[in-house]
Amino acid sequence: MASSPKDKFEAAVKVIRGLPKNGSFQPSHELMLKFYSYYKQATEGPCTAAKPGFWDLVNRKKWEAWSNLGDMESETAMLMYVDELKKVSIDVRKTYYPPQIVE
Ligand code: ST9
């Protein structure tokens, strides 16, 4: 039986939590914010928190990324999270294990 969006999301969350903090691949801030925003939307729904102050830069960026998802359905956010992980995994594989050129 095919697994549900929630099952796939939970599996993807486990993968991300299981990654070493300092591996060979260093995700950009933009990529981390993407995962963060989908995660928050999927688990808590639309952002209703107060906007952090101007000098609280990191939390402000996180808040903005989450808020920008607006009223996106939780299930959609789960699928976006899973898709993003698939995309990044393919890119990482290509970078670290490029196809062998056979002459
Ligand atoms: C490497 C291995 O080099 C080889 C390459 C493999 C490539 C695989 C491709 C995938 C890479 C994609 C990386 C994207 C990184 C995404 C980061 C997301 C922030 N997802 O419980 P707390 C929130 S690997 C999203 O204290 P933990 C949570 O709501 C080298 N957000 O944290 C909270 O926010 P707030 C690179 C999540 O348990 C905040 O995070 N390695 C998730 O100490 C902190 O929560 C990495 O990039 C989630 N699953 O850490 C490591 N869970 O307070 C990636 C919680 O506002 N992993 N949040 O509510 C990590 O950085 C951490 O495990 C963690 C959780 C941040 C996800």
Image (cartoon, rainbow, N blue to C red):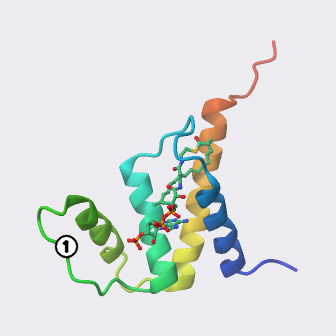
Picture quadrant where residue 46 is located = bottom left
Compared with 69, 87 (above or below) is: above
Answer few, some or many: residues within 10 Å of disc 1's Cα (few below 14, many 20 plus, some between 14 and 19).
some
Secondary structure under tag 1 reads: loop
Query: Considering the image in quadrants, where does the C terminus appear?
Result: top right
Q: With 37 as the anchor, is 11 left or right in this view?
A: right
Picture quadrant where residue 40 is located = bottom left
Q: Nearer the viewer, residue 37 or 16?
A: 16
Picture quadrant where residue 98 is located = top right
Q: Nearer the viewer, residue 102 or 59?
A: 59
Q: What residue is at 63 percent from the left and 48 percent from the top?
A: 89
Q: What residue is at 29 percent from the left and 71 percent from the top?
A: 63
Q: Residue furthest left?
A: 54
Q: With 9 as the anchor, is 66 left or right in this view?
A: left
Where in the figure is residue 4, as x and y percent of width and height? 73, 81
Where in the figure is residue 60, as x and y percent of width and height? 23, 66
Q: What residue is at 75 percent from the left and 19 percent from the top?
A: 101
Q: What residue is at 13 percent from the left and 70 percent from the top?
A: 53
Q: Nearer the viewer, residue 68 or 26?
A: 26
Q: Amino acid at mark 1?
A: Pro
Where in the figure is residue 61, as x and y percent of width and height? 27, 63
Q: Is mark 1 within 8 Å of ligand 1?
A: no
Query: Considering the image in quadrants, where does the N terminus appear?
Result: bottom right
Residue occupied by mark 1: 52
